[in-house]
Amino acid sequence: MAWPLLLLITAPLLAGLGSLLARSRRAVEVLQSLLAGTLLIATALVVERVAARGRVSFGLFPEADALSAWFDVILGVVGAAGTLYAIGYLGEQLERGQVSLSRFRQFFGLFDLYLAAMLAALNVENVAIMWIAIEGATLSAALLIGFERSKAALEAGWKFVILSSVGIALALFGTILLYYSSAHVLGVTSETLRWSELYRAAQKLDPTSVKMAFVFVLIGYGTKAGVAPMHTWLPDAHAEAPTPVSAMLSANMLTVAVYAILRFKAVVDRTVGPEFTGHLMVGLGLLSIGVASVFLLVQRDYKRLFAYSSIEHIGIAFIGFGIGGAGVFGGIWHLLNHALAKSTAFFAAGLVLLRHEHKMLERVPGLLRQMPLAGSAILVAGLALAGMPPFGMFISEVLIATEAYAAAPVAVYAFLALLTLAFAALLYQVLRMALGEPVEAGRALGGRCLGFSAIAVLLNVAALVATGLWIPVQLGRLITSIVGIFGAAASLP
């Protein structure tokens, strides 16, 4: 029985409910710390069982295959680190009187609901229920973005709601079109929208309906993934949300949206071939990198800087999935490492924001001297995000570029040119923050805030370094199965 899978989804719900009912800060901290440990343990057990059996389920729901388990790793590890970081971050705001105990409890109730909804979306076989879970994550994310109730935060939250609602509506229309096509083949049954049944019957589906469905899904879920030109909500939301939420949006929410697109892509590729989805994804990927590169260079807000970096890296992953073959391996490896590096960058940015109480990049140089933890985290994350060895994103970008050169040489030239611009822009901005002499003293941070933040940063950095040096056996098995879902074969480097 796959009880770890059920535990992975229900643990955030129980912790969130417990936090809402708790009467003290200490009780909330204990509950959230237990949640972080539970997420790590449950994720490891789910990966172990899926790697051994190929698929695990707890009755009809939840159910996970290799693709689900891979994204569970991303949400489980980053979710655990983000939960620990949030304890310190919100605790510091509580001590300063910026949030009340009631709001402190409400934050973790929403934060845990958000995490549970995303995990539910990953571990369900039914495409319609996945849509419902992603919509639930959208609603809780909107409340978290506007949590601080400032004018800018409420505006960003409202913008997120409007654009995400349009996106999720388009994704629903794509889902209905897929159902229309599959119902003619499988009949009107509960099996019609199961991924495994859709894969089995894909070659019999109507090609025109399936193509139209993918276009709507790509635009709809692509809006939530922050892909250009549907990215306009992302910089505002990441900049104005509480920093633990910014980290989860960038590392987890965007990743879940990519997961949904990949599920549809696997069906469409079986119906009409991979060229149709590949061209669309490569085109959007190149556009995303190009847009992000320009804004990275001119950015003056360090939270918005990392937001635009997310657009770039989702674009890189899109190119890998669009190219196919070893590019699929590069894409999923890139998503994992991006989640680790980007959440680390936001953890550091949050510490800087707590100390200096502004987000002006040019006013926070010398972080390595003034704030060793934040400065080191930003430097490590920046080097990883720039694609420097020995970090995992260097491996994934090389794989994607190599596969792209074999499949479409013209595309790889554009890819490498845009990647070089993004590399230079991000590294320039990160080094400005990390090096030099501090110009402002700022406010000292409390020991509890630094303690929880240090644990979160070290957890992420350890995982980031490890994924750059080796691939654990069980993750290697998941990769092999995932690449097989898309009808390709790739050997591990």
Image (tube, rainbow, N blue to C red):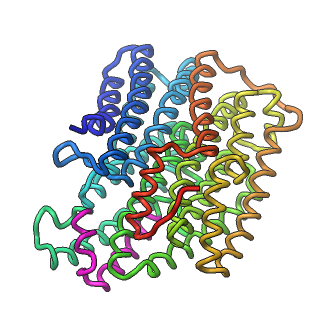
Give the residue at x 10% y 66%: 189
| Residue 287: image location, x then y, percent | 61, 72
Q: Nearer the viewer, residue 342 or 407?
A: 407
Q: Nearer the viewer, residue 91 or 30?
A: 30
- Residue 131 visible in the shown view: yes
Image quarter of the N terminus: top left
Q: Residue furthest right?
A: 437
Q: Nearer the viewer, residue 54 or 211?
A: 54
Q: Residue furthest bottom?
A: 208
Image quarter of the C terminus: bottom right
**Residue 293 position by quadrant:** bottom right
Please give the range of residues in magenta: 196-222
Give the residue at x 76% y 64%: 421
Image check: 274 left or right of 368? left
- Residue 162 visible in the shown view: no
How would you classify the magenta stretch by its main secondary structure? helix
**Residue 274 position by quadrant:** bottom left
| Residue 417: image location, x then y, percent | 74, 70
Residue 213 among magenta residues: yes
| Residue 271: image location, x then y, percent | 32, 79
Image check: 348 left or right of 141? right
Give the residue at x 66% y 35%: 348
**Labels in figure, total:** 0
Residue 413 among magenta residues: no
Give the residue at x 60% y 65%: 400
| Residue 397: image location, x then y, percent | 64, 60
Is 460 placed above or below 194 here?
A: above
Image check: 425 left or right of 170? right
Image check: 149 left or right of 62? right
